[in-house]
Image (tube, grey):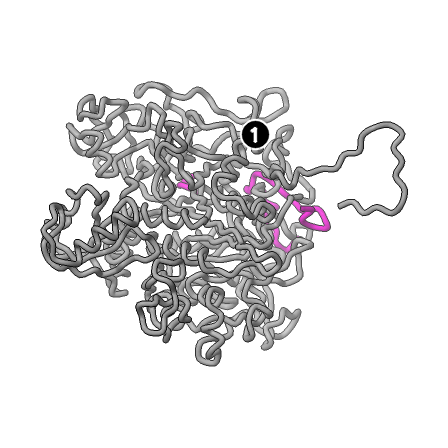
Amino acid sequence: MIETSFNYEEYEKNRIASHKAEGLCFVPDGDGPKVYCVICANASDWNEIHDYIINENEIDGIPNRKIECTNLKKTCNRIASYMISDAEAEQLKTHPKVIGVNLDEGYYEGTYKGRNVFVDSEPPNKTARYSANVKISKDTSLSGFNSGSDPSWLRKTAAQIYRHQTFDNPWKNSSSSTIINDTPEQFGDGTDVDLIVCDSASWFGHIEFIKTGIGEPTNFVGTNPLKSGFASSATTGVCGVLDVILDGPYYLDPDFFEANPGSRLTTRWDGTKVPVESVARAWWGNESTTYRSAKYVSTNISGGTATIGSDEDFGTISISSNYTRARHNGSNTALHTGYYGSSLASHGTPCMSQSYGKTHGWAYNANKWFISIIWASGAISDSILYEIQKVFHDLKPNRSSDNTKNPTISSNSWGYSKPFYNGYYAYWRTSGDGTGEESITVTGSNPNYDVTSPQWLSYFWSDNSHAMWTRPTHSRMVEGASMLDSGVIFVASAGNNNNQLVKSDHANYDNYVSSSSSRTLSSAELNSEMVNRIPDPNCIGNLPNYNNEGVDIYRAFTIGALDDVQASNGDGSFFEYKVAYSNMGNAVDVFTIGDDSIGAQGGGSDNFSRNDSTYRLDSNYNIVSSGGTLSLTSYDQRFGGTSSACPVTAGLFATKLQYERGWIWSNLKTWLKDKVTNQSSNTEFMAQTEATSSSSGWNTYFSLHGAERKILWDAPSSELTAKCELRGSNLLLTGTFTIS
């Protein structure tokens, strides 16, 4: 979680210094040649434009020279990178089949990786699962939550599981400080679903991800997909989490690693046989039979058998040599070390635990995967993140029992933001011609000060930044859309700006803020200045005018945060409400417990003691009660924001896809609409009246401003609601029956 002392200027300084030390590329000064992405609407257009670019031509809108293609970006068939000048980039934008040209952010990671991207953590100031009852509370400020030595507090957790078991609020008739003793129940546990948490460097050695046999769900498996039996050299380790970058190549291409296991495989600290780090990075970054199996090398390369244009023909994805297990995963005896600052040390770890942890997560038996992104030395950028997940989903092996592909869910508790500045101009429901603007007044030159007018911007949370929308033709958006096309389910936090997010048919959809007093709507869109649209990265899956219904549909899921406390109705009952900072509006799909939940701690402070705080590994990688190597002490922590709501939701989604393996994003959207029914009234979930004026109705942090009263719960899917009925009179059943 971002601490109160989080300093954006210091973060930016550390980010740039780290990138320079890594040797990452920065955008060069001047108007000389640079690496640009050129984007077309479809593959056939791109093939035509690509041929024009790399050969001499006399086509309007195409530079008349042979131009170097620096990266074909095979994971997306309508985009590639070229070395061109700024003037040539502007020329290409004029061609009718080119829908976008922008600097390649994946190439210039030094400049772009982590810029304006922040984890959506809590802002300042703010199955019978077990064989025995556990202690559960909404309000984690209770002193008992830190009594780790008390055996009765083993498996203690907050409300992120128990609240979302049912439609009704278990604390409706009692305050959120009431401790409930009960056994959580849930339909599924995420079995045979690949769940990827994409976040800051995280600690795999936390006991939350270790099979110890103490305080675990009764059906907890605890192994990872590379367990013994997966391949000839595979071994079963005690840690359930794998890294997609470092461990995934063995999962995707076991034949290559088994061809020379002595030099390509090693034993991880927990006993799992995994790729040698350098070999794993080379597998991603080199298209050659020296580095991967021939089936993943194009037929136009010596020895390759991958059909050009197929999923197997994914090209190359460069991974930094600083992407290591020590920096990004840690071990039983060492925390991860790659994060830029202490405020980001413990963000990914609680996110992992709330998706698939054995104590705090819904999908505790899912295939647990992780990717370190953006905020750490050697971490990958978000554009590469989309490529990696697409390849992972396309190439992973089918389940042996029925030869079907496991669903893939991606959890993303991060996003882009833009600040409001004094003297900027606000455009509220204007005609879009650059008129009707209103000057913004900020009580100081620093954007962290409060906006005093206009009112529709005055109640944005904390640093008065808004969730940043990015135009769909941007290269990141296109690469993200390609990932979604492959079938990846993308779950993202709504953001913590108290920002109304709306669909394309809403009156506020075209609101924007600009430094210009005459900015037109089209220019505002080009400059990503829209205020009320679904933000980046949530907007990667935009489908314009979906099914000719006159509204854009987003395939990604946007998750708002529910407060941990509740308010009295005055009659002994209580109602719930969104937490003050959570974004809202009719583009938010659902609200989930987020504020002051509990998750595994990967570093930093605010620790809660655990009863099961350490474990011992002997030389054979077995958990033992004495001797062996003692692990670091595992703690839990308060964790909040839409950063918490997102992984909780992703975990619950995994328990649905466990049974509905053929579901795609639209099936989940339908389930949310039809099965996860709305809370009935303000006495259940406060909505308040949506503001329709720029000058009134915004003076609250708790209004849903058009969002549905929808709180996530474990509603049955169609398969889970199947039932058998016997009807009629004088029914006689004889014999032995088994009913399941």
Would you call the spot at circle 1 few (<14 residues within 10 Å), some (14-19), or many (20 or more)?
some
Tell me the residue at 72%/49% (across/down). 132
Q: Is residue 125 magenta?
A: yes
Q: Position of residue 177 (x, y in %)?
A: 60, 36
Q: Vertically, is 98 above or below 148?
A: above
Chief secondary structure of the magenta portion: loop
Residue 185 location, x and y as percent? 67, 43
Q: Image quadrant of residue 421?
A: top left
Q: Which residue is mark 1?
A: 677
Along the horizontal axis of the image, is 424 left or right of 505?
left
Q: Nearer the viewer, residue 597 or 91?
A: 91
Asked whether 677 falls inside the magenta stretch, the response is no
Residue 632, horizontal then vertical, whole percent: 53, 65
- Number of marks: 1
Indicate left or right for 130 with 643 as reference. right
Q: Amino acid at mark 1?
A: Thr
Quarter residue 84 falls in: bottom left
Residue at image position (17%, 55%) is 53
Q: Which residues are magenta?
A: 122-150
Q: Work out whether residue 63 can be spotted.
A: yes
